[in-house]
């Protein structure tokens, strides 16, 4: 039995392709693995706050030395980290905004990438503290930024996610890319069909 954390980040609601595809995966997965449990977080509709001065002060103060004000400033982050660490697998629906992740998801990342919680600093450099996890990222973009395309140099979403989650120890990351969504009905449908075929394969093998 596994516990899955499912996070959507698009603010578009029912018009979001990343939401539709992440939901399709979760639905198919639950049908195939009814014993698994699920936590869902919607950053598009319920965004988390950006890091502020109080957060920074609390994050770099040992818990036993924090004032009540600092405890309050870091509480949501602690809750998000606990929720993140409790999961065995992650399913993230993330649209591409300006070649990278939406600010909703960046704010979430800033809340959970925490020294001494999800990574440590050592004499040898950074050490990830999150191990044995799998991550599935469903992305949606108007154009195509895949390897070998003319626009691949503009894809900062995939390498950013690989780097930041690799920092904390998560390297088993699978991407499902729905792209060319603004390139006409045929191109959109071909991409969605390809993404759904990949999702079916992942339900059977992930």
Image: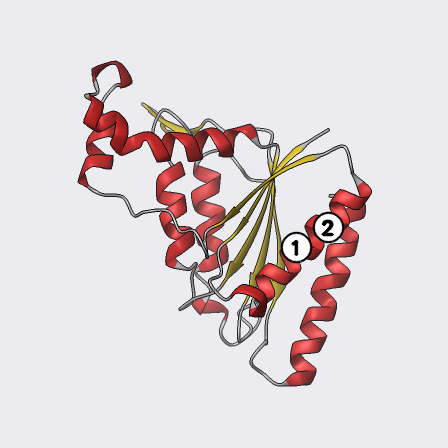
10 Å crowding of disc 2: few (<14), some (14-19), many (20+): some
Query: Picture coordinates of residue 165 (x, y %)?
Result: 47, 41
Element type where label 2 sits in the image:
helix
Residue at horizontal 42%, vertical 31%? 79
Element type where label 1 sits in the image:
helix
Tell me whether the residue at label 2 lies in contact with that at label 1, contact meaning CB atoms closer than 8 angstroms: yes
Left of 35 or right of it: where is 112?
A: left
Q: Which residue is mark 2?
A: 27
**Location of residue 138 with respect to 99 vertically, above or below:** above
Q: Nearer the viewer, residue 89 or 54?
A: 54
Residue at horizontal 69%, vertical 31%? 2
Number of callouts: 2
Left of 9 or right of it: where is 196?
A: right
If the image is split into quadrants, where does the N terminus sit? top right
Task: Indicate the quadrant where residue 149 lies.
Answer: bottom right
Query: Picture coordinates of residue 53 (x, y %)?
Result: 18, 40
Q: Nearer the viewer, residue 70 or 105?
A: 70
Which residue, as the protein is rendered here, is positioned at the far top?
64
Left of 196 or right of it: where is 18?
A: left
Q: CA distance from mark 2 to mark 1?
A: 6 Å
If the image is split into quadrants, where does the C terminus sit? top right
Residue at horizontal 42%, vertical 61%? 100
State whether residue 27 appears in this view. Answer: yes
Query: Picture coordinates of residue 87 (x, y %)?
Result: 58, 32
Residue at horizontal 66%, vertical 84%? 185
Mark linked to residue 169: none
10 Å crowding of disc 1: few (<14), some (14-19), many (20+): some
**Location of residue 29 with respect to 183 vertically, above or below:** above
Q: Which residue is mark 1?
A: 23
């Amino acid at each position: 039995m596994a516990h899955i954390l499912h996070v959507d980040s698009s603010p578009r609601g029912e018009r979001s392709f990343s939401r539709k595809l992440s939901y399709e995966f979760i639905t198919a997965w639950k049908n195939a693995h009814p014993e698994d449990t699920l936590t869902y977080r919607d950053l598009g509709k319920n965004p988390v706050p950006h890091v502020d001065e109080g957060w920074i002060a609390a994050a770099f103060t040992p818990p036993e030395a924090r004032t009540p004000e600092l405890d309050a400033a870091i509480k949501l982050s602690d809750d998000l980290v606990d929720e993140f660490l409790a999961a065995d697998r992650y399913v993230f629906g993330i649209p591409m905004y300006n070649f990278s992740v939406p600010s909703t998801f960046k704010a979430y990342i800033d809340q959970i990438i925490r020294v001494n919680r999800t990574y440590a600093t050592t004499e040898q450099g950074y050490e990830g503290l999150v191990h044995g996890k799998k991550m599935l990222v469903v992305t949606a973009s108007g154009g195509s930024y895949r390897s070998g395309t003319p626009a691949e140099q503009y894809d900062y979403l995939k390498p950013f996610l690989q780097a930041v989650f690799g920092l904390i120890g998560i390297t088993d990351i699978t991407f499902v890319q729905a792209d060319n969504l603004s390139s006409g009905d045929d191109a959109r449908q071909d991409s969605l069909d390809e993404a759904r075929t990949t999702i079916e394969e992942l339900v059977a093998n992930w």
